[in-house]
Amino acid sequence: MAVAGEQARPGAALPRAAVPFVTFAARLRSHGFPVAPEQTQSFVAGVGLLGPRKMADIHRAARAVFAPPPELWETFDALFRAHFLGQTIAAPAESLDDERAFEPEDGAADLIEPEEETEAGEEATVAEALSGRTFPPASESDALRLFRRRAPERLPRRLSRRWRSHRSGGRPHLRRALRDAVKRDGEVVVLPQLKRRMAQRRVLLLIDVSASMKGGTDRSLRLAHTLVQAADRCEVFTVGTRLTRITRALRHRREGPALEAASASVADWDGGTRLGDALTAFLAVPRFAGFARSAFVVVLSDGLERGEPDALIAAVSRLSRLSFGILWLSPLAADPDYTPQTAAMAAIAPMVRRIGDGASTAAITREILHVARHS
């Protein structure tokens, strides 16, 4: 798994002193622990700040950063001893090859054979293929131009904690009342009022960059750039076999450099599909999970995923509880008779506000503004 600034591309060299700590994160992933790139960075930074004098310092830093659940402390400690002290541990009872997610231990582009029995998503694959993408220059479409103009006013809003003077506010403005009283020798003619301000909700955009969504990746990135520029607060992640935050790249005002930076940040373009694992990793990072709290979440994905859907269902369930609402836009929903066919999409349909048309830029912008206007 990788985020901007932490690309473990094949062949990339790490400082020798950091290798044991980075490979420990990879080892945790290979044993089923959801580890995000920022946790790996925090672990390395934490060990550097501690300047550990003994192994217990590194162990405490690992426990604090990776935060394994109590029921997995024993396994976590065994992996720690095996990695840093060379102590052997018992092999896991079942193969974990299928659970390897986000990033190979050695950073190589290992290919994982898809399962023979397809339980959901005929077009999806779990195989990871690291590749790059280029986005040729293109003039802004009419739909994006209209979206850029309307989004600031129409995106969902919420009550802010800040107050402002207002004629019909429900709270007396005591400071202003005292100031007026001083000016009028203690007489207050009208009691000034305060009213809470309205603020735009954060928008969290999750873009599926797997092979099954290859045809829509270009428009999704251009939409993401427009949204980042138009919204007060917006976070953008790509999900495929990895989870990558591209918000910073898209903050560049010009579309060309922004898409170029985003393209360089993402390593799993047109790869396999591990939406469940990627969303689980997203929610495992407290900072990322905080982005979803009370946010308007937009997912651009067909929802096709191979294998058991439990991880995706559990992640969407938690995301729906954290957020203001989830709008799931799928190109498959362009069909008026569309109904979720896969087990995962059928299960998550009641958890989202709407599964809408994600087949074109015009349809996506129309869906976002429609849900925002009726929220």
Image (cartoon, helix red, strand yellow):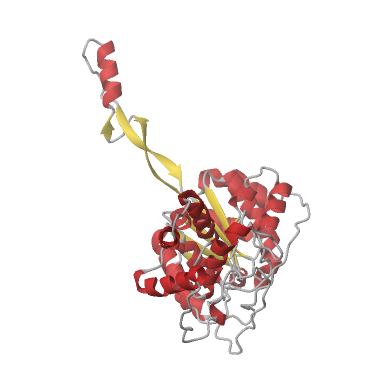
Q: How many marks?
A: 0
* Picture coordinates of residue 23, whole percent (x, y): 57, 66
Tell which of 262 and 183 is nearer to you: 262
- Residue 141 visible from this viewpoint: no
* Picture coordinates of residue 191, whole percent (x, y): 25, 24
- Residue 345 visible from this viewpoint: yes
| Left/right of residue 220 with respect to residue 310 in the rendered view | right
Identity of the residue furthest to the left in this view: 186
Up-down: is 250 above or below 112?
above
User: What's the residue at 53%, 60% (across, down)?
Assistant: 40
Quarter in which the N terminus is drawn: bottom right
User: What's the residue at 56%, 81% (across, down)?
Assistant: 98
Identity of the residue furthest to the front in this view: 53
Quarter in which the C terminus is drawn: bottom left
* Picture coordinates of residue 338, whole percent (x, y): 56, 75
Up-down: is 226 above or below 371?
above
Up-down: is 243 above or below 110?
above
| Left/right of residue 84 with respect to residue 75 in the rendered view | right
| Left/right of residue 283 with respect to residue 117 in the rendered view | left
* Picture coordinates of residue 192, whole percent (x, y): 29, 25
Up-down: is 186 above or below 243?
above
Tell which of 298 and 270 is nearer to you: 270
| Left/right of residue 317 with respect to residue 329 in the rendered view | left
Tell which of 147 and 300 is nearer to you: 300
User: What's the residue at 53%, 66% (across, down)?
Assistant: 25
Tell which of 309 and 87 is nearer to you: 87
